[in-house]
Image (cartoon, grey):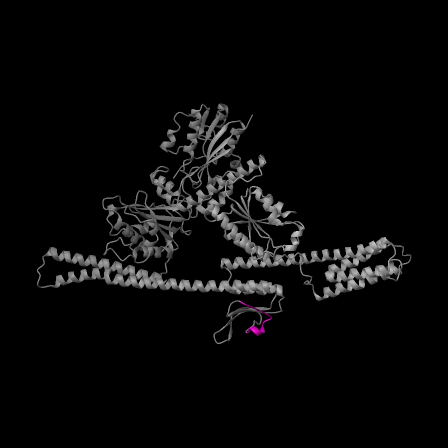
Amino acid sequence: MARGKLRIYLGAAPGVGKTYSALSEARRRRERGTDVVVGLVETRDRPRTAELLDGLEVLPRARGGAAPGELDLDALLARAPRVAVVDDLAHTNAPGTRNAKRWQDVEELLNAGIDVITTLNIQHVESLNDVVERITGVRQRETIPDEIVRRADQIELCDMSPHALRRRMSHGNIYPAEKIDAALSSYFREGNLTALRELALLWVADRVDEGLAHYRGEHKIRQTWEARERVVVALTGGPEGETLIRRAARVAARSRGGRPQPSHLMAVHVVSGDNLAHPLPDVVAAQRRLLAELGGTYHQVIGKDVPTALLEFARGVNATQIVLGSSRRRSWQYVFGPGVGATVARESGDIDVHIITHEEVGRGRNLLPPLAGSLSRARHLSGWAIGLLGPVLLAAAMRLAPGDGLGLATHVLVFLVATIAAAMVGGLWPALVGAVWSTLLLDLLFTPPLYGLSIHGTDNTVALAAFILVGVLVAFVVDLAKRRALQASRSKAEASTLSLLASSVIDGQEPLPALLRRICETFGQRSVALLRQEDDGAWTRVESVGDAPCALPDQADALVSVSDSLALALRGHVLPAADRRILGAFATHIGIALERQRLARDAAEAKRQAARNKIRTALLAAVSHDLRTPLTSIKASVSSLRSVDIELDEADRAELLENIEESTDRLNGLVGNLLDMSRLQTDTVQPKIRAVGLEEVVPATLIGIPPHTVCVDVPDHLPRVRADAGLLERAVANVVQNAARHNPPDGPPIRLAASALGDTVELRVADHGPGVPEEHKDRIFEAFQRLGDAPRGTGIGLGLAVARGFTEAMDGTLIAEDTPGGGLTMVFTLHTSTADPVPGGAPAGAEPGPPGGGADTPPEPARPAGAPETEV
């Protein structure tokens, strides 16, 4: 029996229309005459989804037994339709069912030859579980192995923009009205939805790439399909690499109409298996960093033939363009062949090839390293001793040996041992001299006629010529292998050191003393000092580590300049030239770190100065108008009361006294906000944190607000929060008063609601006024900010600034969101107190997440096994 086909409707979040699309496909197939049965579908009380079930055969759910309400798998297998619709692929079955997971039920259906249409949210894919948790703060309890999803015959993405999804949520098309606020403020934040949408799009795009690669492989398609532009840049590890990478990035950007993506720009370095001329680690590291900045990826492949390996890689990734640099070979070297660029261009077929000129063209390449090595003096002397004395001792031993009947071939092999030993100990030159010296001894002592330079016999001549040739070649090979081993070891150490240094400086986490200590340890120095030259020419120590650091540059064993006035002075031993290159990198990084610190200090001081100037200017404006207005009103009322020329009745006197009282209260509030803002600006707010219940604070914040204008929903069982009761009361009161000023008199009341979310409690103050544009939602928390739309006399624009300042002083947050249906919602987020138990509720720190379950809802707090799923 042929296996059934699996079709998955994949979504980024609940509510994007997966179940609706699955049922629409089922109806289309039924209309074409296909036998379709709905095994299980969760409509979640959505009318338009439920309408699609009309006319479809719906299998009853399991009744009785250990798992009522679950998919009746046995009945569906017995019915054996051509197509079955099974919603929520990642669902966990209740205990007592045959399979623990619904995807296992679907596997049985597929093995029985039944095609299955199902739904899945991207957050339930196992490999993305940790990524989703970092984005949303919610760990998914229901996951499905990636392999199950990848084996699907068809995956269709149900896409919807975050804004459109939140609008559907606000209109009540996804969750009931009483659960909308909690969902919008937690799992369905716009940032969360945007990140989940990108995950879904990228996952599907990778699946499309896999499908294309599989199809091309099955059909042995070698030519390039320009489904999308992919640029491959060939690197040699030389200094021209950065020029090629930048040019390739521009080519990729033009083909994409913007910044290149990692899948569109790839750099490849082909290394032949016997290649000894490896690139310098610092050059490769710099090129890889540049690639990362430009959005490309680095690859290294091994191949005997560079053009062939490069073209195989390009065709393997379906590249459309290859970027190479002009050859660095000199003119005479072209006698050995046309070169990599010409060969690739000739054999590239339908892949476009760009040959880029650069400054290194025609300068040649060092095929072999310089003969001067880095061996110690003792090693050199030992090598010369072996090369000169070794052959003499071997010749004496063989001449004095009784009955020496060895042939010339054996003598040659014995002397070859001395040549190899000289190369391994002393390097190339002792081995070359030893080979020539061994040849002379072989001719004098072991080749007839003896004790003369003449040679009898062609075979003897050939043997001696072969010996000197083999000796020279062996000396070269052994010396090169030894040099490359030393270079590899050193390059590895240099690369590791530079990598650690670069990462620590880029992150800005390693202070100056730690950098100096790292230099001291890396180069084995006794002390390291950073010296600064003052304007009068004197030197001072900025920072130092180790014993007896240098006070003057003349005292240093190694000195390197950091800038015009800064220098690194090392004391311990003199550094070789190779180490000075790495030391120069350290000095550069230290200079960058110091400059970054200076710029950060200057920027912070400039920001503080600008804030102070802004506060002074705004304060003058406030004093000149907003504070003068109530004072003028009080002065006028008092003057009228004291006037003897005007006769006032009791009603007039009462009105004037009421005006004085109102103006005084308003003046007191303005002065209070000014004092609070002054405390925040001078960092003198010291909150007394303790466990506070919102039911204690909220009533006090409503004093002076008409009761019918506010609807309060603060459950008694909420966890207590870590806060200063006085500061929290002042912050909430300011926000409520702001909402009261903007809420329409004939509109719905202000809603003040609180809810627990993991280890935090959210207090939301929602009005139904004109709202605030998205680009101004941060500006409303700035001091003296009224966005130019508030009439004069309504305040000096400090209420929300003070509210946010007090909230942040208590380690909380205050943000602004849109109210569903219009208006502005202020959201306080405060940490729960772990010291106090939560009356009648879950313990503080319980697993966060909006209510709901299954594939079409975010996860909820743990529910009893087998209990039906609920939604926000």
Residue 270 higher or lower than 501, as above or below? above
Q: Is residue 181 magenta?
A: no
Q: Percent from the top left, x then y, of residue 400?
A: 89, 61
User: Front-most of 773 and 108?
Assistant: 773
Left or right: 151 as drawn, with respect to 675: right
Quadrant of residue 650 in the image? bottom left
Residue 4 higher or lower than 467, as above or below? above
Q: Is residue 558 magenta?
A: yes
* Residue ID at (74%, 66%): 381
Residue 227 visible in the shown view: yes
Residue 499 higher or lower than 768, as above or below? below
Left or right: 736 as drawn, with respect to 490: left
The N terminus sits in image quarter: top right
* Residue ID at (26%, 59%): 670
Left or right: 84 as drawn, with respect to 667: right
User: Front-most of 34 and 98?
Assistant: 34
Look at the image and give the residue range highlighted in magenta.
552-561
The C terminus sits in image quarter: top left
Residue 859 higher or lower than 673, as above or below? above
